[in-house]
Image (tube, rainbow, N blue to C red):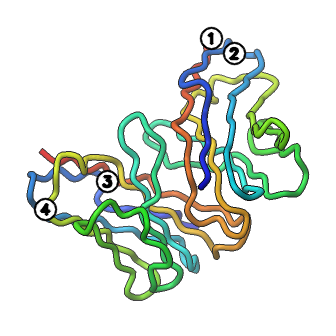
Amino acid sequence: GAGVSQTPSNKVTEKGKYVELRCDPISGHTALYWYRQSLGQGPEFLIYFQGTGAADDSGLPNDRFFAVRPEGSVSTLKIQRTERGDSAVYLCASSLTTGDGDEQYFGPGTRLTVT
Amino acid sequence: AQSVTQLDSHVSVSEGTPVLLRCNYSSSYSPSLFWYVQHPNKGLQLLLKYTSAATLVKGINGFEAEFKKSETSFHLTKPSAHMSDAAEYFCVVSLPFGNEKLTFGTGTRLTIIP
């Protein structure tokens, strides 16, 4: 079946603009995660959803970042007033549940460049 | 808090020789540990996972890792490297009661010399 998909694959925006990044998880997966990977670093956790609710948003760097998952499937990561430091690859992952050992399946990422 | 340290940012081996990628972890609890691989322009893929069952874990593509609590290590090995193994490898830790909130290491880039 289809894996996790993310759109767009690349996004270039000007400093101060608003962006939305979309994630389509694997069908039937109840848990959805967002990570951010800066150049030369490992991915860093941002937020995860169990169903429609954000179960842990402790990784969001500040209040310019927000994510939703209104119907428990597709999720959108929203960044307001973008800054050059927001430039990174944003990764989405999903898993069947959050049970011990459930594998997180990652999408290919959205590369965000803020000029 | 939990963390992982990947001791080598870059490892080069000749094709057909053994691979060793080193990882040490720190966790307040008995952790779940993973190795993920990232090929260029592809998504992260799970190689193997340890979740408090057998300490020697076998994964895909001939990779395996051994959980050593006394050394707080979870090194990744493969007996014979293949050109297709060239990629970035991440050691990952999470709390034992669920796999949300993965904490990644900084990665080890594996280069295979023909």
For this orientation, the residue located farthest to the right is: B54
Quadrant in the picture for residue A100? bottom right
**Pointers 4 and 3 in contact (CB under 8 A)?**
no
Above or below — where is B21 with respect to A1? above
Camera-side residue of A95 and A66: A66
**Pointers 2 and 1 in contact (CB under 8 A)?**
yes
**N-term-proximal mark, 4 vs 3:** 3
**Which chain does tag 1 point to?**
B
Which amino acid, by three-letter code, is at mark 3? Answer: Ser
The residue to which callout 1 is attached is: B114
Q: Quadrant of the N terminus of chain B?
A: bottom right
Q: Position of residue A114 (x, y in %)?
A: 17, 48
Which amino acid, by three-letter code, is at mark 4? Answer: Arg
Q: Are marks 4 and 3 on the same chain?
A: yes
Alpha carbon of mark 4 to alpha carbon of mark 3: how far?
A: 20 Å
Q: Position of residue A107 (x, y in %)?
A: 47, 57
The residue to which callout 3 is attached is: A9
**Which chain does tag 4 point to?**
A
Which amino acid, by three-letter code, is at mark 1? Answer: Pro
The residue to which callout 4 is attached is: A81
